Amino acid sequence: MKIQESAENYLETILVLHKKMTNVRSIDIANEMGFSKPSVSEQMKKFRENELIQVDGNGYITLTEKGVELAEKVYERHEMVAQLLMDLGVDQETAYQDSCRIEHVLSDVTFDCIKKYYLSIKK
């Protein structure tokens, strides 16, 4: 499933927030991303319709299996590209900023090659 860059960022944010806290709500996502609550609510509605998240009666958001799969894919790209850039001498802040942009434009084939190469040199 291919989704837009902004949706990938939302999914990655939900995943990261779940690593920090047990319960994630729309307001947590809005605060983390610097977006308005209505913007986040609209995206969460789309995610529910596409079965990427579930929202319980208390408004707590969890990723579905499909949502986790997509979020982890984006997160892995973000982390690996950032680490590669830092290994090349890029400072951490710049590496993460650039990685956030790069991760969305790499094809699966290119990322798989980068991953294979990176893991081979890190042995």
Image (cartoon, rainbow, N blue to C red):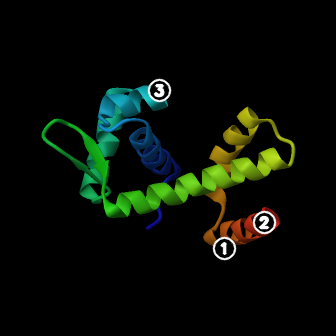
Kindly report the distance in space between the C-alpha atoms of the residues bearing marks 1 and 2. Answer: 22 Å
- Of badges 2 and 3, the one in the foreground is 2
SS category of the residue bearing label 3: loop
Question: Is the Cβ of the residue at disc 1 closer than 8 Å to that at disc 2?
Answer: no
Kindly report the distance in space between the C-alpha atoms of the residues bearing marks 3 and 1. Answer: 32 Å
Q: Residue at x 42, y 38 (%)?
A: 17
User: Relative to 72, is 19 above or below?
Assistant: above
- Of badges 1 and 2, the one in the foreground is 2
Question: Which amino acid type is shown beneath numbered disc 3?
Answer: Gly
Question: Is the Cβ of the residue at disc 2 closer than 8 Å to that at disc 3?
Answer: no
The numbered dot on residue 123 is 2
The percent coordinates of residue 70 (x first, y second) are 45, 60
Left/right placement of residue 57 relative to residue 8 reads left
Left/right placement of residue 79 relative to residue 40 reads right
Left/right placement of residue 80 relative to residue 60 reads right
Q: Residue at x 70, y 53 (%)?
A: 81
The numbered dot on residue 109 is 1
The percent coordinates of residue 108 (x first, y second) are 61, 70
SS category of the residue bearing label 2: loop
Question: Is the Cβ of the residue at disc 3 closer than 8 Å to that at disc 1?
Answer: no
The percent coordinates of residue 67 (x first, y second) are 37, 58
The percent coordinates of residue 72 (x first, y second) are 49, 57
Instruction: Tell me the quadrant of the picture where the N terminus can be found.
Output: bottom left
Residue farthest to the front, as pictured: 123
Q: Which one is earlier in the sequence, the residue at label 1 or at label 2?
A: 1
User: Relative to 84, is 29 above or below?
Assistant: above
Q: Which one is earlier in the sequence, the residue at label 3 or at label 1?
A: 3
Per the image, the residue denoted by label 3 is 34
SS category of the residue bearing label 1: helix
Q: How many marks?
A: 3
Which of the 4 quarters of the picture holds residue 69?
Answer: bottom left
Left/right placement of residue 113 relative to residue 39 reads right
